[in-house]
């Protein structure tokens, strides 16, 4: 972990990985340098986070190993989300700010279908902020069920 950040140091991503904060569904897979977890935000059931296992803030700070693992893992996770959720599209984007300050690097893998578009009245880059404002969090039991199905596809 980077100096001054990590589990117990105010990094939610590190705290979730370390088990210091409850994580419905637990780790989906953990492979090498990356951890896959269900999103704890209001981005809908089946939305996963692919994050570096160590505390890292910038893509430019990734090691050669982390970089080599990232593309294939994002593809596998996106394919698993497609299989389990059957969305119209799977959004994949980088998020790395917490409270307006660069934070733990993570990629959001979000299934998007008519339900999400209709509920929010938004699409594309406007969808996630609209979902955030609506504040509809999936139930923990729903997250656990979908994570079990995702693990079965990813194993």
Image: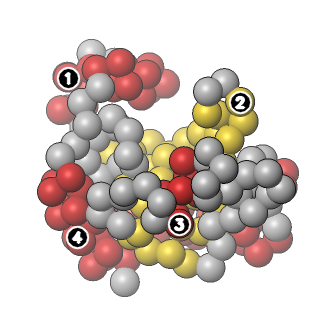
Q: Nearer the viewer, residue 65 or 24?
A: 24
Disc 3 from disc 2: Cα separation: 22 Å
Measured as percent of width and height from the top left, residue 97 is found at: 64, 34
Compared with 144, 39 (above or below) is above
Asked whether, in this view, residue 147 is left or right of residue 155, the answer is: left
Q: Which residue is rendered at x = 61% and y = 47% of the image?
A: 11
At mark 1, the secondary structure is: helix
Asked whether, in this view, residue 50 is left or right of residue 101, the answer is: left
Which residue is labeled 4 in the image? 149
Of callouts 1 and 4, the N-terminal one: 1
Which residue is labeled 2 in the image? 101
Q: Nearer the viewer, mark 3 or mark 4?
A: 3
Q: Nearer the viewer, mark 1 or mark 3?
A: 3
Q: Which residue is rendered at x = 38% and y = 46% of the image?
A: 40
Which residue is labeled 1 in the image? 119
At mark 4, the secondary structure is: helix
Disc 2 from disc 4: Cα separation: 34 Å
């Amino acid at each position: 972990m980077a100096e001054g950040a990590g589990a117990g140091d105010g990094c939610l991503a590190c705290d979730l990985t370390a088990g210091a904060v409850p994580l419905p569904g637990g780790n989906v897979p953990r492979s090498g340098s990356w951890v896959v977890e269900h999103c704890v935000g209001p981005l809908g059931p089946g939305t996963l986070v692919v994050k570096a296992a160590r505390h890292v803030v910038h893509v430019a700070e990734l090691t050669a190993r982390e970089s080599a693992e990232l593309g294939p893992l994002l593809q596998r996770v996106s394919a698993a989300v497609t299989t389990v959720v059957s969305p119209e599209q799977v959004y994949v984007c980088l998020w790395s700010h917490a409270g307006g300050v660069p934070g733990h690097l993570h990629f959001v893998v979000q299934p998007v279908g008519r339900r999400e578009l209709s509920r929010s009245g938004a699409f594309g880059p406007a969808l996630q902020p609209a979902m955030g404002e609506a504040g509809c969090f999936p139930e923990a039991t729903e997250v656990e069920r979908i994570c079990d199905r995702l693990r079965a596809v990813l194993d």
